[in-house]
Each structure stands twice: as structure tokens, then as C-alpha cells.
Image: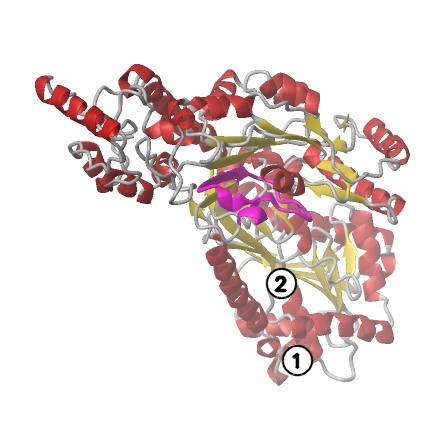
Amino acid sequence: MVVEPWKTARHVPQEIGAARDALLRGVLGADLISFNHFDYVRHFLNACMRVLGLESAPSRLEYHGRLVTVSICPAGIAPDVWEPGEANGLAGARLRGPDDARRIILSLDALDASKGIPQRLLALEALLERRPEWRGRAVLVLAARDRDRRVDAPLRRAVDGLVGHVNGRFGRADYVPVHYVKRTLDENEVKALYAAADVALICSVREGINLWAMEFVAAQSARLEDRAPGVLVYSEFAGCASSFQGGALVVNPYDADGVADALHAALAMPANARRVRHHALARYVHTYTADLWAARLVRELRLARDRTSEHTRLLPLDVARLRSSYERSRRRLVVLEYDGALAPHASLPQLAQPSPVLVATLKALCGDGRNTVYVLSGRRRDDLDAWLGEAAPRLGLVAEAGYWVKRAPRLPTAASGTALDDAVCPTPPPERAGSLEDRPEAPPTSFRSDLARELAFPSTPGSQRDDVSEDVTASPAASQTPGPAAADDAEDEPRGWEAPRRTVDLTWMDEVRPILESFTRQTPGSALEATDARLCWHFRDADPDFGEAQAKNLQLHLEAVVEHRPVRVRTSAQKQAVTVQPARVSPGRALRAAVGDVEQYDLVLAIGDERYAEEDVFELFEGSSHSFTVTLGRRLSRAAFFLDEEEVLPTLQTLAAVSTERDRYVASPPSSATTLPRTGSSLIDLVARAPPLPPAPVQLEDAESAARERKLRAQSTDEPRAPRPRMGSSPPGSV
């Protein structure tokens, strides 16, 4: 989409102010938005920021998961087409009169309110009134093509009245100041006027670019050698005004006296000055041609397509797939960024408190013994403790962007207990399991234990575990110890806030804090948040333009102050804040030290919307086949998936529901192995439904053992058959 001039959000007319949202959203439906000048790009991005609240980069916008490219492609003409021929020169000579004493001011435009035609007539009147020497010599050729539109009726009457007023006031029998032409001129007539004109007057009150000014310059390039080229008087509200500064006389069309002075300077300008100004304009016109404009548009469109394809590689998170992996996994790591993902960005901590639903969801996730949950934030540790730590004691916290860490309890390993295994196959109560004295000895291996070990499930008591050597059997104490005890022991470990192990230099805070306080006083709506090792200046609630300008000035000032200090200054577009913190402190480093080896987890879920300058959290999980790294919104990121902000909490609630259902199952285990929930493996169902195996023959070592065996066998033939044991218990006759 090629857009004409774009006004700032403060200058949108009242009649279209109500529809400006729809207008902006409609324009943002394009993949490429091209403007003729940088000012229009700046105004457009400013409008998107103020009206729609979008965050933008100098050349792109992210809108509803799409990447919209914004470019600058100045439009141009084909200069060779407008070179006048010999016939056009003869026609121009006739317009000058027999003595060649008249000077022609050309004004060629359509009858439109944006062209400033009344302003041109008022400027001519001011010229003839203030400079009497031009009476009878200066002629304005006003060719305003009338399209007979009803909307132009008031303008048409105003122009007709002004033409009659000027001609009646300064006209004579042999002199008519204004030659008013309403019809459409053909190409040869236009070329003749271009070649004959001494001054071209463009007084647009709002226009993207005036191609007729470029046509005038191209026609003047082929002017006869005995005459100096004409001068362009150009409105500052028309496109390319800043590009024409070196060659044109730029004026304000609402200042009639100022335009009159510019016309006098143009008419009286020496030939050498005319040639110098014309050379600057001709260089621009012959450089930015229509062919170049078309080629640049095609190239920008291809680049926009490539950027969009690169941007769309970020896939939406498949929540169903995540839940399936969550159900099958046994050791999970969940990393959540607080600001932006769990709570909205806010300048004051009081406005960033979590909702009760969020707290309940985090509590449910932490209540699952298979989960290790960490929340990352730049807030103070006291605030995080009050908001989340008391409600979810097992929650790991990283505060002040990595300076303070409260570690989550470690997940028990297979050797330290059977907490993870009992979540799927609960250990039977002691009265069902029996005692060692009532059970005959059995060989250390069986088909059931081998298959269970292959599936990484707990084997029956007396068989080897996957983390124990082949020639060692489980001890009686281990077989009777309930699995959740290990988790309780891990939870009872003392947990507190830990600072970085290496000494961090914080002497810079006394020097930087007064600077931030000064900017806070100078910027209404800004706020300063100070923590133990971090200073954050928020400008979210300040005026968008002024706040952004102050943030840039502040960053430049701070970078000069802490140039040789181990300090990092960063401006966050997402959080609209300037943060100053130690260079070697970041959430990524703190998280790596807290969780250790990531490969010990068979599921990793990381959700956040911040990209760190040195240590990206998502970088910790790159290359892992069992990780789900999720950013907020479709954007250029290290993450593999994206979610919208409103989808984060429902996704976490889905996972919390799975954990809550598992806890309910563990609290009330089924009475038979056939009622175990399906885990997606047919082998597990085969093991659950398999009949108990008969006891293997036992090698007796003495007569006393043989007698005891005969006695037990005789009792088994007289008594009814014992019920089939569940998984996790031992079949009769085995240890």
C-alpha cells in the first residue's frame, strides 16, 4: 500500500476522528506500507502508538501476529517525456507578448481544497499591491481543472470571486493579471506552459507529493540556452519539501505576504542563481524517477515477504500436544515470566499484583510432586514473597531480574524414594503387603519385574530397580517406606533467598539514582522503582512522545556516566522502562544456576515476552526436543511457539487440572489394577491385566527350610485363593 501524507494523531480532523481506529486497522492489513517521505512514516507510527497502542520499530510493526513492513519510496516521473519540442517553445513565446517583457507565473493543479488555489490568488494580490513594479508585467496562468464535483461548489465560487476581484482591481485593457483556465489541457499545451513559465507556484495546504513540480523541473532542463531556467516556489506542506530545500523557495501558503516576497525574489533572481537552484532540483528529479520508484517498491515487497515468512516460522502453541506431553512426563520444569505473561506491565508494584485465579493455578502446579516451577520477575523479593511465596511455598522465585533467587525444592531421584513412581502405581498399605516372616523367599528376578524395569515403572518388592545393580535386591525397609516421604523430606529443606555467589559491585547506584530522580521530576507521569541491585525508570504513564524522547536522552546520559563500570543500561520497548543493573546479573544466569542440568527434565515449559541483552532465558532450552518455549504474540524471538496474552492463564489452568486430577487419584487409589488410568502404553495395560505368576522353585539349603515350605504349601491348598495383587505389590510367594 502506497500512502499519501499522514497526519499526526493530534491533527486528525473531527469528522474522521471517530473512524480513525478502523482506518488504521485497514491500512495495517497490508504487508508493505510505503510513504514518500520520512515525516509521514514518523506520523504514521506515532498514530499507531497513540491510537492503537502498538509498539513499533523504525521499519516494521507487529500487529495481530503479523509483521507489517513500513518503508520510504519517493515517487517520481519519467523526465524524458516532459522535454518540450520546438513547437512548444514558439507557443510559449506568444504567451510572453511581442516585446517579451512579461513574466509568467504558472499554477497548474486540479480544483481541490487541498491544493490551496485561493491562497495563490491572495499571494498574487499581495505581490501586485506591495510591489507596483510588477503591475502590467507579472501574469498568473491559473489552470485549475474543474471536475464538476458537487463537493467543490463552495470552492468553485470562492475561486471565481477571487479571480474577478484581482482582475478588476489591477487589470487594464492590455493587461489581465490572472488567466483562469478551467478545462483540461492536453499534453502539448502543458509542455508549452512549462517551457514558458518563469516561476512555478505550488501552494498546497496538504499534499503527499506534487508531481507537476517535478514535470516543471524536467521541462525547464531542456529550456533554450539563451534563457535561464525558471524558479520553483513550493509549499512546505507538500511532499518532498525538505528534499527541495536546496533548489526551491519553500513558503507557508497561509502567509500571503511571505508568498508574495518569495514571488518577487523568484522574478528578480539573477540567471546564475537560477541555474544553481535548478541544478539541485534537476539532480533530484533525474535520480528518483518513476522507474526507480517501481523497482524499489518491488524490491521492498519481496523483502517484506521474506521478513513475513521468517516471522511466521513461529508457530502457535498446540495446547493439546502440550497437555499430552505433560501427562506422560515424570519430571517437569515450568518457567514463567511474571511481568507481561502472568500480570500486565505496570509502573507501580501495587498495580501488578496477581489475581486470585493465578495464585490458585500456581499453587496447583506446585502441588504436583513432578513439577519444578519458577517465576521470573524484576520486582522486589518482598513483593514476590507476599504475592506468591506465601500461597505456594514450593514455588521457585527469581527476583530483581536475577539478583535474588529462591530455589524450588528438588525433585526426588529414583534412588532417594519412590515418590514419582507411586504417583502412577501407589504402594499398597502395609496390611495388604504383609510381612517378610509370612512370605516365602523368592528369586530376585521375574518376568513382571523385568518388564516393569524396561518401562521405567516400579518393580515388585524384591526385584531389582533400574538404579540398583543386578546382584542387589531391595531391602525390607525400602519396600515398606511410602513414596511421598521423599517428597516431604525435600520440601522440608530450608529455603531462603540467595544472592549471587560472586561479589557484585553496587557502588554505581549512589551515582545513578540522583540522575533518575531528576528525570522523574522532569517527566510527568514517570516513576522510579528502586530495588537492592536494580533501578528501573518507568515512562509507561507519561506522554508517549515525550516519554520516549526522555528515555532516549536518559539512556545516552547513563551510558556516558557508567561507561567504564560493570553496569548494563537497557531500554525495554515492551515494558516502557529504562533499567540499570549489574552487567553480570540476568534471569537467564540465575535460572541456570538454580535448575542445573536441564536434561534431567523430560518436559520444559518456558513462557515469557522479554528478550535479554546477554542471557536469553529461551537460550537455555534451545536444541531440546522436549521443551516448549513460548513467547507472547508472533514476533522475532528465540522461542519456538507463541501465545496471545489472554491465552497464558487458560493454558496453565489446563495443566493444573491434570495435576489436580492426578493428586485425587493418588489420594484414593483404585482397588484393582484393571482400573488404572490409561497412560498411552499398551504394555502397561498388559502388565496390569497379567495374572499373578506362580512362585518359582526354591533351592532349599537345609531340612528346616524344606519343612517350612511343605507347611506353607499345605496351607495354600486348604485356603481360598488370595485376590490378585495390584501393580506395586508382590504376588504370593515372592519377596
Please state which amino acid type lies under the numbered disc 1. Answer: Gly
Please state which amino acid type lies under the numbered disc 2. Answer: Pro
Q: Looking at the figure, which quarter contains the C terminus? A: top left
Q: Which residue is mark 2?
A: 74
564 sits to left or right of 190: right
Query: Which residues fall within the magenta stretch?
Result: 597-621
Question: What kind of colouring is applied to the model shown?
Answer: secondary structure
Where is 675 relative to 34, above or below?
Answer: above
Magenta stretch contains residue 14: no
Q: Residue furthest front?
A: 703
Q: Position of residue 134 (x, y in %)?
A: 83, 61
Q: Position of residue 98 (x, y in %)?
A: 74, 77
Q: Nearer the viewer, residue 314 or 150?
A: 314
Q: Nearer the viewer, residue 648 or 690?
A: 690
The image's mark for residue 89 is 1
Q: Position of residue 604 (x, y in %)?
A: 48, 41
Q: Is the residue marked by circle 2 packed among few (<14), some (14-19), or many (20+) residues within 10 Å?
A: many
Where disc 1 sits, the SS reads helix
Q: Position of residue 324 (x, y in %)?
A: 34, 38
